[in-house]
Amino acid sequence: MNILILNGPNLNMLGLREPEIYGNNTYQDLENYLKGLESVYHITTDIKQSNLEGIMIDILHYANDRFDGVILNAGAFTHYSYALYDAIKSISIPVVEVHLSDINNREDFRKISVIKDACVASFMGLGFQSYEEGIKELLKRMK
Ligand code: DQA
């Protein structure tokens, strides 16, 4: 199984941004962690990050039929990007929403995910492990 892992705005700042929420691990640490899961789950991954909504949409379109599924941490776009919602709806591969933090236990504006209903599942609040849960979910669906 070939999985696209797409990270949105400000995730490149991991380790520096709000460590009390996101921890001290850097974006490179996240990439290393995800690469380490390849041999555990017998998968291949492509890991991308963009701070730009349009680029994320282009990447999702590109992923269609080239990957078996997508793990998406849309960052703050989660809470207001109907364009990302439409992009997820416009492709036919499953997309799993993930978040490092528990968006339901933070500011009110984070409690709404406008992309949730376009995704096959959501995992949050587990740090890096949210991504692993997402991968397991995709594997379950591929069986
Ligand atoms: C996040 C949660 C979002 O609310 C926030 O804007 C992020 C990161 C997370 O992984 O916890 O940038 O998606």
Image (cartoon, rainbow, N blue to C red):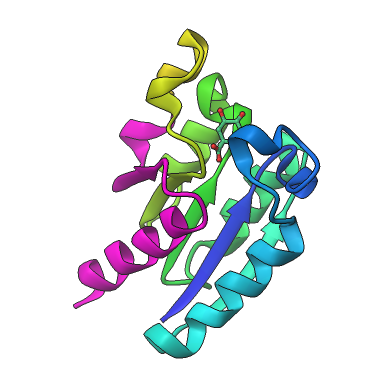
Instruction: Check the image and report above or below for 108 versus 52.
Output: above
Q: Residue at x 38, y 66 (%)?
A: 135
63 vs 125, nearest the viewer: 125
Q: Residue at x 69, y 65 (%)?
A: 29
Residue 112 visible here: no
Q: Is residue 119 left or right of residue 16?
A: left
Q: Residue at x 58, y 39 (%)?
A: 74
Q: Is residue 19 left or right of residue 63?
A: right
Quarter of the render that holds ligand 1: top right
Instruction: Check the image and report above or below for 3 versus 102.
Output: below
**Residue 39 locus on image (x, y percent):** 47, 90
**Residue 34 locus on image (x, y percent):** 56, 71
Q: Quadrant of residue 42?
A: bottom left
Instruction: Check the image and report above or below for 109 versus 9.
Output: above
84 vs 71, nearest the viewer: 71
Residue 122 inside the magenta-drawn segment: yes
